[in-house]
Amino acid sequence: MPELPDIAAYITALESRIVGQPIEHIRLQSAFLLRTAQPPLSDAEGRVVRELRRIGKRIAIGVEDDLWLVLHLMIAGRLH
C-alpha cells in the first residue's frame, strides 16, 4: 500500500499541531464527501483533540467524549 507512508507522514505532522488543541470549526467542501452525519460534525467543534491514529488508509482524529473524525484521502487526496 504505497499510501501508508503518506498517511504516517500526515499523522506525524498533525500530532504536534492539533493534539491538545480544541477544534474551532469544521468546513466540509462537499456534502457528497460525508458518509455519516450522526452525530453531526458540529458536535466535534469546541472539543479538544486527544489522539490521532491510522486505521488502514484513514486518519482518525479522536476528540473528547470518545468522538472520532475519520478521514480518507482517496487516491490523490490532499489534506488542507
Image: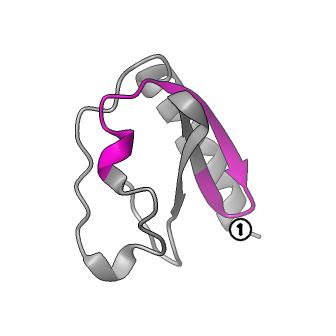
For the N terminus, the image quarter is bottom right
Q: At x 46% / y 62%, what residue is drawn? A: 38
Q: Nearer the viewer, residue 13 or 33?
A: 33
**Residue 9 colored in magenta in the image:** no
The answer to whether residue 80 is seen in the rendering is: no
Up/down of 38 relative to 31, above or below: above
The residue lying toward the viewer, choosing from 63 and 3, is 63
List the residue tagged with mark 1. Answer: 2
When the figure is inspected, residue 9 is found, relative to residue 50, above or below; the finding is below
Q: Does residue 25 lie above or below 48 as drawn?
A: below
Foreground of the two, 52 or 10: 52
Give the image quarter of residue 44.
top left
Residue 57, x across and y down, in percent? 67, 64
The answer to whether 71 is drawn above or below residue 61 in the figure is below
User: In screen coordinates, is 36 left or right of 60?
Assistant: left
Q: Point out residue 77 in the picture as x, y percentages from the top left corner.
A: 44, 69
Does the rendering let one see residue 74? yes
In the image, farthest residue toward the bottom: 32
Q: Position of residue 45 (x, y in %)?
A: 31, 37
Residue 74 shown left or right of residue 44 in the figure = right
Crowdedness near tag 1: few (<14), some (14–19) or many (≥20) residues, C-alpha within 10 Å = few
SS state under label 1:
loop
> Which span of residues is magenta-colored?
42-59
